Structure formats: structure tokens, C-alpha cells
Amino acid sequence: MFGVDPTVLLIVLLTAVSAAAICYGILYSRIESQKKADSRVNRVSQAETDRLKVKATRDRVQELSKRRKSVQDSLKDLEKRQTENIKKKQSLKARLGQAGLSLAPSRFYVFSVLFGLFVMLILFIGGAPFLVILGLPFAAAFGLPRWLIGFLIKRRQNKFLDEFPNALDLITRSLRAGLPLHDAIRLVAGEAREPVKTEFRRVVEAQQVGLSMSDACGRMNNHMPLQEVSFFAIVITIQAQAGGNLSEALGNLSRVLRERKKMKAKVQALSMEAKASAAIIGALPFIVMLLVYLTSPQYMMVLFSDPRGHLILMGAGIWMSIGIYIMRNMVNFEI
């Protein structure tokens, strides 16, 4: 084998390095210009992409703003209508319907007058004073029946609130199972307990005559004027106006109503002591008056026989009424 001269190998290596350096020097400007051109192209394409992203974001924000404005307008309109319904004095026919009574107003007035005449007859037979015979039947004819209607309305509303979250859960499960909203409401109208069953049946009947779902649910507030029903109508209206996951919204509403009910029960339990104290304080003057009358009738009868005693009783009654009213407002809380 022939040996390689180190000097020749070094010359070849230096020649190759020199050629590479000359080539790099010649091609450097072209390589740099190509890099700059690629960089400008990348910046232009990036700017175009950013411009499209900014435009898409701006369009999305504008769409959300339009939807938000539409929802706000719908809520304001619904709140305005509900406020007008609350301020407007409800007719006797509407109150009878809210109480669940299928009774015409004319028949209600007839029964009230007959009841007042019956009380007057009982007082006349019992030998009551003339003023009592005139005053008590009037209160029995016009006060007691209306109080009874209010009591029935309150009891029916409490039954509705007990069953309403279960009805919302049934609608939520039906929607998640793939049923449309009107079928889910028809399912509640057929399987729920009273009075929820009757109220949702009215919604189904309103749809059958051509009303939209939001309008039909809004009409439920006329027969059941509760905040919970207003919340349900608002959720349906928002879903109709802006779309969204209705099953999730109704599920959240059901959970809120249950928590609201728990809060009411907790407040009622915490205020029972104050209510008991108010009842005792309010009944104490009457109990003392009864005990004094039983022990010393002549001492107490002066208040009923003397005109000055009448003024004292009237003033005491007014101050007792004011005190009972103040205590009632102090122990009653709205949730």
C-alpha cells in the first residue's frame, strides 16, 4: 500500500474548506433574501389568520350581544306584564279559579247572602243586641267567604309548590330521553298530581288552540300567581328566544326551587319562637280581661256600660291592632 503524504492531505482539506467558504459567500445573500421572503410570507399569512380570528371573535361578540339584548327585552316585557297582572285587581271569577272551585260568581254571592241571613236568624233567635244582629251577619256574608277563598288559594298554592319541582324533573328527564317539549308537558299533564296536573293540562289545551309554548306557559301565571311559575315561564321564553340547553336550565330551576323550599322551612323553624312569643303577647290582654271578668264581673262591666269605657276599649283595640300588625311583620319573612 502506498502511504499518503500528510502535506497533500492537508492541502486537499484546505482547498475543500476554501471552496465551501467561497460558495457560502456567494450564496449567502440569496439565502438571506429567501429567508426574508419566507418571513414576510409567514407574517402576511399570520396577519391574515389573525384578522380572520379577530373578525370571527367580533362577529361572535356581536351575536352574543344581540342574543343578550333579545333576552333582556323579552325578560323586561314578561316582567312588565307580570307586574301589571299583580297590580291589577283580580276578579272574583279568577280567584275562584285559583282556589280550584268550579263555582260561578253569581252563585257565590247567593251563597254568601244566604249564609249571612242564616247567621242573622241565629243571632235573632239567641236574643243578641240589635247592633250585633246587623254587624255580624254583614261580616259573615262578605268577610268570611272571601277569607275562605283566600285560605283555599293558599292551600292549593302550597300543594302546587310541593309537586312542581317533581314535574320539572320529569320534564328534564323526558327532554334528555329525546322527547320534544310539548310531549314532555303532555306527560306531566297526564301523570303529575293535582293541582300541577290541572295547570299543565291548561298549558296543553292552550297549545292546541294555537298559542306558542312561551305564551301558554306565561298564561299559567294567571291561574297560579307564584314566583316559581314566573321563573318557569321565563326559562321557556329564553329558550324560545335564544335557544340553549333546556333540560339543563330546567334541572337548575328544579334545584333552585328545592333549595328555596328548604330555606323557607328553615326560616319558618327559626322564627317559630318569635311567632309563639307574639301570639302569647297578643292574647295576654284578652286572657287577663276574661279572668278579671270571671272573678269580678262588676269591675269589668264598667267598660261595657259606661261611654268612657267604650272609648277606652276602642283605643285599646286600635293600639292592639297596631301592635299585632307590627309583630306580624317582624316575624314574617319573604324568601
Image (cartoon, rainbow, N blue to C red):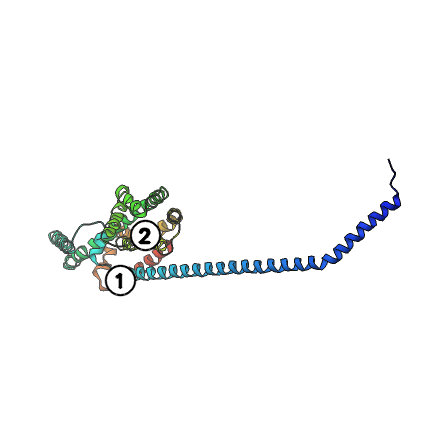
Residue situated in front as seen by the camera: 38 or 130: 38
* Cα–Cα span, label 2 and label 1: 18 Å
**Residue at 38% in and 59% down:** 71
The circle drawn on residue 88 is: 1
Q: Position of residue 145 (x, y in %)?
A: 20, 53
Q: Is residue 308 above or below residue 188?
A: below
Label count reads 2
Q: Quadrant of residue 42?
A: bottom right
**Residue at 25% in and 49% down:** 204
For the view shown, which residue lies furthest in the front direction? 2
Q: Residues within 10 Å of mark 2 (few under 14, many from 20)?
A: many
Q: Position of residue 14 (x, y in %)?
A: 83, 50
For the view shown, which residue lies furthest in the top direction? 1
**Helix, strand or loop status at disc 1:** loop
Q: Position of residue 223 (x, y in %)?
A: 25, 53
- Name the quarter where the N terminus is drawn: top right
**Helix, strand or loop status at disc 2:** helix
Q: Is residue 249 left or right of residue 203?
A: right
**Residue at 83% in and 47% down:** 12
The circle drawn on residue 150 is: none
Residue assigned mark 2: 229
Amino acid carrying mark 1 in the image: Lys
Amino acid carrying mark 2 in the image: Val
Q: Position of residue 183 (x, y in %)?
A: 29, 45
Q: Residues within 10 Å of mark 1 (few under 14, many from 20)?
A: few
Q: Is residue 207 left or right of residue 104?
A: right
Residue situated in front as seen by the camera: 281 or 258: 258
Q: Nearer the viewer, mark 2 or mark 1?
A: 2
Residue situated in front as seen by the camera: 216 or 15: 15
Sequence order check, earlier mark of 2 and 1: 1
Residue situated in front as seen by the camera: 273 or 290: 273
Q: Is residue 46 left or right of residue 143?
A: right
